[in-house]
Each structure stands twice: as C-alpha cells, then as structure tokens.
Image (cartoon, rainbow, N blue to C red):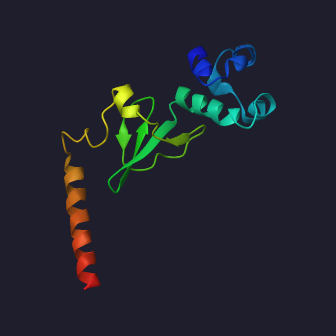
Amino acid sequence: MEEELTSANLIHLLSDINNEFDGDVTKVTDNWLSDHCGGLQIPRVQTIIAKASGNLWYMGKTGSNKWWLNATTKEYQYMPPAPAQNMVCVPVPDGFFNAGGVPSPSENNTESSRATKNWAKARSKMKTVQAFKKR
C-alpha cells in the first residue's frame, strides 16, 4: 500500500489509514475520503481501493470490439463487468501492454474458443443482412 500511495503522491494519507483502518485501504469510506482528501485526490484513492479489492478494470477497444481487463487477475472479458462496491473502470493507460508484459487482446487470440468463432460467424451474417437491407 505504501508504494501505491507514494506513486499517486498520497503518502501523507498513509499514517491516517494505518491509524484508523489498521492499514487496510479497502475499509476506507467515502465520508473519510471527503474529510481527508481534496477533489483531485479522491479518484486516485478510489483507484487504489479498487485495485486492492480486485475491482479495478481497464477498458479498451480492438477494432469494433470493446473489452475489459481486470487489473488484479489480468483476465479479459468482452462484457462489461458486473457492478460491485468500489468498482472503477478506467481507460487503458499509455504503454500498458509494452511495460506490463500483458498481451493485448488481439495478441491473446492464439486459441479461439468455440464461442469466439460462433460470434465471428454471427457478426459476419449480421453485416451481410444489413448490406442487403440497404440495397
């Protein structure tokens, strides 16, 4: 937690979190945030809380497909994550795939599942039907 707060320039909150929440950032409440943080600091602390609780999601787009990546488990999904307490969705940071060692969704398709293949067929059929409707 100390490294996370230092990288977000919030190290001044470390002693308060240790004293009031026994060092568990996931127990920090919204009321405490509004009392101890400024307007720009609150989203940074909420991101740290979401990452610690496994509810930080990066979202991106490959072609016309949107995807979500869990920052804790590094697992992709192509449906929006179910709403949860302390959940935060942020756009993928620049250079994430280069520095993090995580393959991008387009590189992750070495094995195509049956559902992926069926979805590709269905999308192709829908485009064909739309093209005929326009004529």
Task: Give me the residue at 69% from left, 16% from top.
Answer: 14
Query: Does 53 sit above or below residue 5?
Result: below
The residue sitting at the right extreme is: 35
Residue 74: % across, % down: 38, 32
Of residue 9 and residue 24, the one placed in the foreground of this image is: 9
Tell me the quarter of the image containing the C terminus.
Answer: bottom left
Instruction: Name which quarter of the figure residue 7 lies in.
Output: top right
Q: Is residue 65 visible?
A: yes
Q: Is residue 25 left or right of residue 126?
A: right
Q: Is residue 55 left or right of residue 27?
A: left
Tell me the quarter of the image containing the N terminus.
Answer: top right
Query: Does 64 sit above or below residue 90?
Result: below
The residue sitting at the bottom extreme is: 135
Q: Is residue 48 left or right of residue 125?
A: right
Q: Is residue 21 visible?
A: no
Instruction: Name which quarter of the figure residue 92 lies in.
Output: top left
Residue 62: % across, % down: 33, 49
Instruction: Name which quarter of the figure residue 34 lies in.
Output: top right
Q: How many marks?
A: 0
Residue 115: % across, % down: 24, 51
Query: Does 19 sit above or below residue 39?
Result: above
Task: Give me the residue at 65% from left, 36% from top.
Answer: 43
Q: Is residue 15 left or right of residue 128?
A: right
Of residue 62 and residue 15, the one placed in the foreground of this image is: 62
